[in-house]
Amino acid sequence: MGVRSTNPTQSFIDDFFRSGTPLSSGGGGGPTVAASGGTTVTSSGYKYHFFTHPTSDNFVVTAGGNIEFIVIGGGGAGGSYRGAGGGAGGVNSNWSGFPGTYGGDPYNVSAGTYPVTVGAGGGAGPANGGGGGHSTFNAPGVNSNTPIKGSGGGGGAGFATNDGGHVNGENGGSGGGGRDNTSSGGTGSGGSSVKTTGEIGNDGGDATEAYGGAGGGGAGGAGGDKDQPGTTGPSLGGIGYGFSGIPPSYGTPGPSGPLRYFGGGGAGHVYPNISKSGGYGGGGDSSDGSPTTGDAGTSGTGAGGGGGGQAETAGGAGGTGIVIIRYVV
């Protein structure tokens, strides 16, 4: 599940969640792959295929071999009216050092057409943020290969009016944060991380004190709780996860310069108009006051959106997911 973060720049957290060296020879040796599909980039001895929303595309293999993959679901949107942050989409990969169950495992493809679907980010709504869409590679399983999924992130908790409501975040690849918008303490629990095989993700934060929303969970850490009285709750978005070797036009910067980060959670809003930071990996900041809704999660990272302000009917939209495939050339 990772660790809870109240400071998304702590280097020890980054060290714990750092990805390792990529699989050699395109994932353990074997013949050179030849394939098409998506946007292609050749860099540092690898050919990359990037699939982004709204495209549903195919990875078409003409010569088989071992590949590496990253599959990330769309992020959840932030909630409204002192809303909570949205959870990041689940992150799935077989890169060496990745902490999911496929980390370091070769994935062999033979000639054929492998479907790719990239999940949308969750839409902002009048209460809870919408959940992100699922991303898939090779569903329903071409040539008997395993289908790979990145689950959509959970929406952050919100309320339909500017009153009442201890509201729970929604479940997803990472869970959305919970919300508490009354003058007395209660608990709006964070959504749970509900993952399929190979994914990483974390729970949303809990709102246990009044007037604010908690942070959405990220791929590398749980969302920050709204757990302090008054206006000082942390409510930070959960940190994302960094991959090495990604070209700089994809992902976001983070604490380790060589890595590109994905799957940051959205931040929760704190009364009266205190913006909190989304997790690195594209998580949206929460609103700093009317008429702002909270920042959207960064497109192509699966990040969660930030919570809306105290008078806002919507939070920030979730970031779209992404599928990345690479192999040695």
Image (spheres, helix red, strand yellow):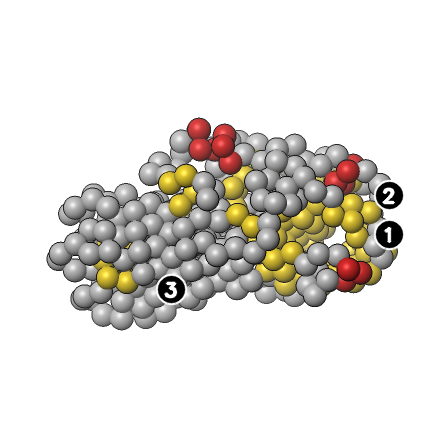
Q: Amino acid at mark 2?
A: Pro
Q: Are marks 1 and 2 in contact (CB under 8 Å)?
A: yes
Disc 1 residue crowd, few under 14, some 14–19, many 20+, Cα 10 Å:
some
Q: Amino acid at mark 3?
A: Gly
Q: Quadrant of residue 167?
A: bottom left
The residue beneath circle 3 is: 129
Quadrant containing the C terminus in the rendered view: top right
Residue 265 in the image: state x and y as whole percent: 42, 49
As rendered, which of 74 and 275 lies closer to the eye?
74
The residue beneath circle 2 is: 31
Relative to 17, residue 325 above or below: below
Residue 221 in the image: state x and y as whole percent: 43, 43
Residue 324 in the image: state x and y as whole percent: 65, 50
Which residue is drawn at the image coordinates 51% and 36% (left, top)?
A: 17
Q: Which numbered marker is on residue 63? A: 1
As rendered, which of 19 and 54 lies closer to the eye?
19
Which residue is drawn at the image coordinates 71% and 36% (left, top)?
A: 23
